Image (tube, rainbow, N blue to C red):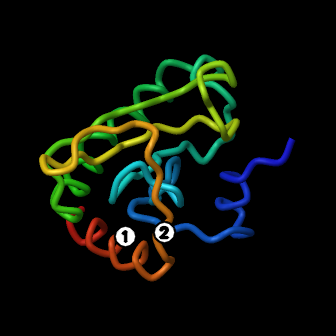
Amino acid sequence: MACIFCDILDGKLDAHVVYEDKDHIAFLDKYPIDEGHTLVIPKKHYERITDMDSDDVGKIFSLIPKIAKAILLGAGADAFSLAQNNGKAAKQIIPHVHVHIIPRYNNKGTEWTKRQIPSSDELSKLAQKIKNAI
């Protein structure tokens, strides 16, 4: 099965990267729930978190505070939500483990189903602000 996230890792698709190390990459969601919505993924392909060993699960989640703090600063968010879905019944759209960091804004509320479609230029500017905050 083709994997969009693996295509990003292979350079076949573009992404607005905010963080990268040897085992992980974090980039802005192309269809964000709110401005600054970021996905953190392992570079190694796993479909579900239950396919990973506990050390790898710990490594990906240990990055969340650092990246979330940068999103709060870079996007000017007031708070954030985390989500991690496993399997179609859980609404996992891309079959590659990923953690959603969803910024929240006091003046907007917390709708989970709303999606935006920002321009590539908007995403590039925001990604740079978040990178600078890391």
When the figure is inspected, residue 62 is found, relative to residue 121, above or below; the finding is above
Question: Residue at left 33%, top 71%?
Answer: 126
Q: Residue furthest right?
A: 1
> Taking 70 as reference, is 119 left or right?
right
Q: Amino acid at mark 2?
A: His
Task: Tell me: residue 118, above or below residue 92.
Answer: below
Task: Name the residue beneath numbered marker 1.
Answer: 127
Helix, strand or loop at disc 2?
Answer: loop
Q: Residue at x 22, y 41 (%)?
A: 109
Give amino acid for label 1: Ala
Dot 1 and dot 2 residues touching (CB under 8 Å)? yes
Compared with 124, 66 (above or below) is: above
Q: Position of residue 64 (x, y in %)?
A: 32, 40
Which tag, 1 or 2, sits closer to the chain's start? Answer: 2
What residue sits 51% from the left and 54% below the top? 22
When asked about the image quadrant of residue 128, the answer is bottom left
The residue where tag 2 is placed is 16
Please give left or right for residue 4 compared with residue 38 in the image: right
Is the residue marked by circle 1 packed among few (<14), some (14-19), or many (20+) residues within 10 Å?
many
Pointer 2 local density, CA inside 10 Å: few below 14, some 14–19, many at least 20:
some
In the rendered structure, the answer to whether residue 2 lies left or right of residue 102 reads right
Please state which of residues 67 and 34 is positioned toward the viewer in this rendering.
34
> Spatial distance from mark 1 to mark 2, Cα to Cα?
6 Å
Residue drawn at (42%, 31%) of the image: 83
Of helix, strand and loop, which one carries label 1? helix
| Location of the C terminus (image quadrant) | bottom left
| Quarter of the figure with the N terminus | top right
